[in-house]
Amino acid sequence: MREITGYSNPLVKRVRALRDKKHRKREGLFLAEGLRILTEAREEGVLPDMLFLAEGDLHPLARELVAEMEAAGGEVICTSTDILAKISGKDNPQALVGVYRDRLMPLDRLDRTASDIWIVAQSLRDPGNLGTILRTGDAVGAGGLILIDDCVDPFSVEAVRASMGALFTQSITQCRWEEFLPWLRAGSGQLVGTSLKTEHDYQAPRYASPTFLLVGNEAQGLPAAYEAQCDLLVKIPMLGKADSLNAAVAAALMAYEIRNQKRKQV
């Protein structure tokens, strides 16, 4: 373990820069904060390349993580709370900040038979929604999240926080629609889209395995051309004045309906 006390330390500057997407892309690294998220990663067999920790007493789980890092030859850096705040961009930072390698899974390496539910999100813009959808995927035992077209960065600090560690349990794939559709049609899988332009209630159909649940952009929903390629379009009924649910909430309702059906089929 080594100690860093100066704000101007080159490593502090380098790690702080990972809050910016451009630097994350260039380095292939991202930040994760907090004992819970770092413990989730460790339980999945994923250790950070670098671990920053605040001076003072450590939680027993944090001590275990430090010991495992040092045994694996990883870099452990002790520093002040003020420097951790500079790295994380938060006034009250977590006591642990890890620097991880990005976890993108190429589309051609996905094993669609690994799960009977996959979540596909098109042009998501909100990192909170993306992180929440990852948590939902973990909760329902989905195989992973496939991000279509220009989605928010899944490794942004905000998305990582919102995922609460689920980005370490779910595979994450990024691709264009023009890549995804041929891949999907080359094997088994039912593409189910959420839409306001259908009368099919989301609880009425019987979903086939594996089900690829497609949710659209928060503001516009799915493009008409994408809806036309779906095997099935379904609608969540709205009984009040709102015409639709938040994208992450809709994804959770749909994913649990699909999971519930598959539980009953066992």
Image: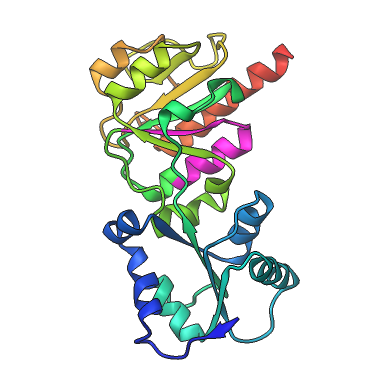
Q: Which residue is drawn at 27% across and 38% down?
A: 150
Q: Residue furthest front?
A: 73
Instruction: Please state which of residues 208 and 239 is positioned toward the viewer in this rendering.
Output: 208
- Above/below status of 127 relative to 179: below
- Above/below status of 14 relative to 247: below
Q: Is residue 1 left or right of residue 109?
A: right
Q: Is residue 145 visible?
A: yes
Instruction: Please state which of residues 200 and 117 is positioned toward the viewer in this rendering.
Output: 117
Q: Is residue 234 visible?
A: no
Q: Where is residue 46 in the image (x, y as percent from the top left)?
A: 60, 53
Q: Position of residue 24 (x, y in %)?
A: 34, 58
Instruction: Please state which of residues 76 and 241 is positioned toward the viewer in this rendering.
Output: 76
- Above/below status of 235 relative to 54: above
Q: Which residue lies furthest to the bottom in this view?
A: 5
Which quadrant of the rendered structure holds the C terminus?
Answer: top right
Q: Residue at x 59, y 39 (%)?
A: 138
- Which portion, as a residue range, is magenta? 131-148
Colour scheme used in the picture?
rainbow
- Above/below status of 132 relative to 89: above
Q: Where is residue 107 in the image (x, y as percent from the top left)?
A: 42, 29
Q: Quadrant of residue 209?
A: top right
